[in-house]
């Protein structure tokens, strides 16, 4: 299984991440990574992320802003 993030603007359009993601073998690894680099991703233009497992959407979009409703 491969876990991957999709990086998006607030309108849902895909954008290139400011930090190059790894290939993750577990959901926990993917989530730990996003927890470490979310500020850099936000500063680089990504505003939300969606998590996929082998191409299947698991959840998202999840905002990278701290002021989520």
Image (tube, grey):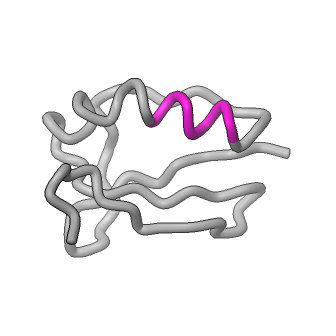
Residue 30 vs residue 64: left or right? Answer: right
Position of residue 16 in the picture relative to residue 32 (left or right): left
User: What x and y, as percent, mark residue 51?
Assistant: 57, 56
Q: Which residues are magenta?
A: 28-34
Image vertical order of residue 3 relative to residue 52, above or below: above
Please state which of residues 57 and 63 is positioned toward the viewer in this rendering: 63
Image quadrant where residue 18 sits: top left
Rendering coords of residue 3 (x, y %): 69, 45
- Considering only vertical position in the picture, is 12 above or below 45? below
Q: Report which quarter residue 11 is drawn in.
A: bottom left
The residue drawn where x is 31% and y is 58% is: 48
Quadrant in which the C terminus is drawn: bottom left
> From this viewpoint, which residue is outermost toward the right?
1
Residue at 39%, 62% (x, y): give it.
62
Identity of the residue drawn at 22% across and 63% down: 68
Residue shown at 58% from the left, 27% from the top: 22
The image shows residue 21 at horizontal and vertical percentages of 50, 30
Rendered location of residue 36, percent (x, y): 41, 25
Magenta highlight on residue 33 = yes
Count the numbered circles shown.
Answer: 0
Left or right: 25 as drawn, with respect to 18? right
| Magenta run includes residue 1 | no
Q: Main secondary structure of the magenta part?
A: helix
């Amino acid at each position: 299984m491969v876990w991957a993030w999709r990086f998006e603007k607030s309108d849902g359009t895909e954008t290139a991440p400011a930090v190059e993601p790894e290939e993750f073998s577990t959901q926990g690894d993917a989530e730990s990574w996003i927890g470490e680099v979310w500020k850099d991703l936000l500063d680089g233009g990504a505003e939300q992320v969606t998590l996929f497992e082998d191409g299947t959407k698991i959840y998202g979009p999840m905002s990278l802003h701290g002021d989520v409703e």
